[in-house]
Image (cartoon, rainbow, N blue to C red):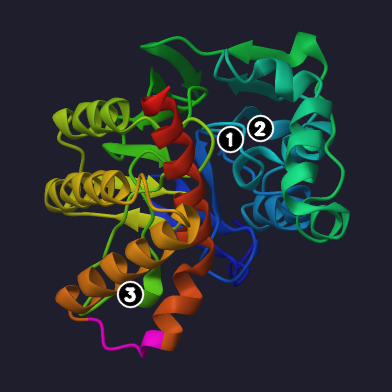
Amino acid sequence: MTGALPHYVQALGHGVHAVDTGFHRPLFDAAYLIVDNGRAAFIDTGTRHALPRLLGALQALGLAPEAVDWVIPTHVHLDHAGGVGPLMQALPAARLMVHPRGARHMIDPSALYQGALAVYGQAEMDRSYGQLVGVAAERVATSEDGLQITLGLRHLELIDTPGHALHHHCIWDPISRGWFTGDTFGLSYREFDVADRPWILPTSTPVQFQPEALKASITRLLARKPDSVYLTHFGRLGDVATLGSQLLGLLDETVALGRAQAQHPDRHRALCGALLALYRARVRQHGCTLPDSTVDEILALDVELNAQGMAIWLDRQAA
């Protein structure tokens, strides 16, 4: 290590470092850098705009780009994998480890880009995501359930975790006894911490939300009795069993809420209103005293995306 870490890098112990990618707002989107015996791996990358911070984290830890063996997006949504291509260009020795359902989108991201462009528009794509860059096929490896890969002296395990997305896997680190969970184990924003107790909520973002599969994936993560979970949104959390129980309970409430609004004539607006009311109530139950306006602002993007994903799931159920 060359000295004090940059403000956007936090050492979490066991060779694990959180890198705040700067996407959307501070403490919203994390990439993780694991270092073991001089070798390194990135788990999730943020968008291409995160590249200076990812390379800055390596430099601050005294590591050359050649020290990185693996880049592992948990899934190919752009806030997790939009920076994969530029990062791989900067890391000559790295291989990309991606879920098999996401590999083609990392090799040729044109369809991924066009899908996001249709949702966000050109101005927002340029501002938040930038151009996507493909990865040469020979540098891409695909995971399978239970696959173990070597990083320095440790062995990371990848398991298939559908529910948030069909192209989602989670990564087990036996040294920290922690899961890198992407979006499978929900979202937890530090603004809602009360006396160091986090609040957590599930995500039902489009387009592959499957609540029963998600519950099964969460239950599988809990069965390992982890000491920690490392959330992309955001950070390392302990007391995993308690949080898992809360997460599963809120997921059930979310599904019931969605079904109750299924036939509403203005369904999207009704879903947004019902989700926000539920989240506000649970935040207050947690003990958070932030003004409603602040709570609403923090959760606005998640309310919108969760409502969209819930609607798509409801339509599939009705088909």
Residue type, numbered disc 3: Phe
Q: Which residue, given by chain and number where applicable, does mark 2 sit on?
A: 68
Local SS, label 3: helix
Q: Is residue 265 above or below residue 143?
A: below
Residues under labels 3 and 2: Cα distance? Answer: 34 Å
Local SS, label 1: strand
Mark 1 near mark 2, Cβ–Cβ under 8 Å? yes
In primary-sequence order, the first of circles 3 and 2 is: 2
**Taking 109 as reference, is 16 left or right?**
left
Q: Position of residue 109 (x, y in %)?
A: 79, 27
Residues under labels 1 and 2: Cα distance? Answer: 4 Å
Q: Position of residue 293 (x, y in %)?
A: 44, 87
Q: Position of residue 190 (x, y in %)?
A: 38, 71
Residue type, numbered disc 1: Ala
* Residue at position x 49%, y 36% in the image: 312
Residue type, numbered disc 2: Val
Q: Main secondary structure of the magenta part?
A: loop
Q: Nearer the viewer, residue 306 or 143?
A: 306
Q: Is residue 278 above or below residue 115?
A: below
Local SS, label 2: strand
What segment carries the magenta color? Answer: 288-292
Q: Which residue, given by chain and number where applicable, does mark 1 sit on?
A: 40
Q: Position of residue 130 (x, y in %)?
A: 84, 50
